[in-house]
């Protein structure tokens, strides 16, 4: 155990050193975008990976916080820290309302309720006068943090985003390793047994839902300051599908999986943009390869094969017990993997369907081609 703890600390220090020196090699704006989406994916993974609730409405929290922060900073003249807190508060309030309405249902019903509620938020963002409609809120000033630190400097803004990401990531890590985290894992594995032990499952689910929504709003607020823009893209349902893909590609129910998935998809989005209309085909092929090769996600697959085999040579009885435990663990992993694969296929199919429909609606009719 001490050796594993020491290895984890060394790995964490190496990652922190890499993050601190990354702007020397990579474009800081790209890194900031990846960190914002990494925090968003970690918040979503807290809900689906450790409670087992699949939400298709997390773009509502991400986008609404982005709009509130942008409006508060640009129109009301809030400093960036108060603008971020305003967006975080709105996301927490929306999370409380959405969670109270949706947490009573499970499975596909829960997912559809969250999607419907998120579409209501999208309609409000489209029609409300302060959001700017299809133009969004542009030219959002970054301002000075605490009245001292100028965030207009790109490098300073990067380290601020990195610090906020580390705080959010540490909060998630502390949550899943606390007694509260053990209870939500028990609810994910066997909710009736957890209820029989005296735990109110819906209360725990609601708390996790609100925490996930709040951290998603924190990521959206950061993104609006990084790009100085809040638009309908942030609150659109495709953003909810995008964060599902990040989580599944990186590794569902893993700590670093959403971070890896976010960096992978953002990098793919940047470096494949030069392919033009072929980018959708290439992305589809990459997603299929990830499903076939990394069925537990990138981090999940690496962790599975890096785990040393357990020693079962202590006797026949211990071997049988170990085999039974391994079988139960495999069945749980297979069940979680099947849920992840179904969600992945649903999101990919929905994205491709809407992309095809969008291209058909944009293509000219025969009358326009041959006047």
Image (spheres, rainbow, N blue to C red):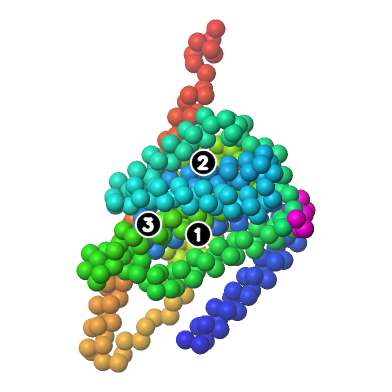
- Please give the name of the residue rendered at 74% of the width and 53% of the height, measured from the top-left corner: 144
Q: Is residue 232 left or right of residue 307?
A: right
Looking at the picture, how far across and down is residue 308, in whole percent?
43, 80
Q: CA distance from mark 2 to mark 1?
A: 18 Å
Res 70 → quadrant: top right
Quadrant occupied by the C terminus: top right
Using the image as rendered, state which of residue 139 and residue 351 is in the foreground: 139
- Magenta run includes residue 219: no
Q: Which residue is mark 3?
A: 206
Using the image as rendered, state which of residue 265 and residue 315 is in the foreground: 265
Q: Residue furthest bottom?
A: 314
- Magenta run includes residue 150: yes
Using the image as rendered, state which of residue 82 and residue 312 is in the foreground: 82
Looking at the picture, how far across and down is residue 112, in whole percent?
34, 43
Q: CA distance from mark 1 to mark 3?
A: 17 Å
Q: Earlier in the sequence, mark 1 or mark 3?
A: 1
Q: Is residue 281 above or below residue 135?
A: below
Q: Earlier in the sequence, mark 3 or mark 2?
A: 3
Asked if the residue at tag 3 contacts the one at tag 1, i.e. Cβ–Cβ closer than 8 Å, the answer is: no
Q: Which residue is mark 2?
A: 235
- Please give the name of the residue rendered at 34% of the width and 48% of the height, measured from the top-left corner: 102
Q: Which residue is mark 1?
A: 42
Q: CA distance from mark 3 to mark 2?
A: 22 Å
Q: Which residues are magenta?
A: 147-155
């Amino acid at each position: 155990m001490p050796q594993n703890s020491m290895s984890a600390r060394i790995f964490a220090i190496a990652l922190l050193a890499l993050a601190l020196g990354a702007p020397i090699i990579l474009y800081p704006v790209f890194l900031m975008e990846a960190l914002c989406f990494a925090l968003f994916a970690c918040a979503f993974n807290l809900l689906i990976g450790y409670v087992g609730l699949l939400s298709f409405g997390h773009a509502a929290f991400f986008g609404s916080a982005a709009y509130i922060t942008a409006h508060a900073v640009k129109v009301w003249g809030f400093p960036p820290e108060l603008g971020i807190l305003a967006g975080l508060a709105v996301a927490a309030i929306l999370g409380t309302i959405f969670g109270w309405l949706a947490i009573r249902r499970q499975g596909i019903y829960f997912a559809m309720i969250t999607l419907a509620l998120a579409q209501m938020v999208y309609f409000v963002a489209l029609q409300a006068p302060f959001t700017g409609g299809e133009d969004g809120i542009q030219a959002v000033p970054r301002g000075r943090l605490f009245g001292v630190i100028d965030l207009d400097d790109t490098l300073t803004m990067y380290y601020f985003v990195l610090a906020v990401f580390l705080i959010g990531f540490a909060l998630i890590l502390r949550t899943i390793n606390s007694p509260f985290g053990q209870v939500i894992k028990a609810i994910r594995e066997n909710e009736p047994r957890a209820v029989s032990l005296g735990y109110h499952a819906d209360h725990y689910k609601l708390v996790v839902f609100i925490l996930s929504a709040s951290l998603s709003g924190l990521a959206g607020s950061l993104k609006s300051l990084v790009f100085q823009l809040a638009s309908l893209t942030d609150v659109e349902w495709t953003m909810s599908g995008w964060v599902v893909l990040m989580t599944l590609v990186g590794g569902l129910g893993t700590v670093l999986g959403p971070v890896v998935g976010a960096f992978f998809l953002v990098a793919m989005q940047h470096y494949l943009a030069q392919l033009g209309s072929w980018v959708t085909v290439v992305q589809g092929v990459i997603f299929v390869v990830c499903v076939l090769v990394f069925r537990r996600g990138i981090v999940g697959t690496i962790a599975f094969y890096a785990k040393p085999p357990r020693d079962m040579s202590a006797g026949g009885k211990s071997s049988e017990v170990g085999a039974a435990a391994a079988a139960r663990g495999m069945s749980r992993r297979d069940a979680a993997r099947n849920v992840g694969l179904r969600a992945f296929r649903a999101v990919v199919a929905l994205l491709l369907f809407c992309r095809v429909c969008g291209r058909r609606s944009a293509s000219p009719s025969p009358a326009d081609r041959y006047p």
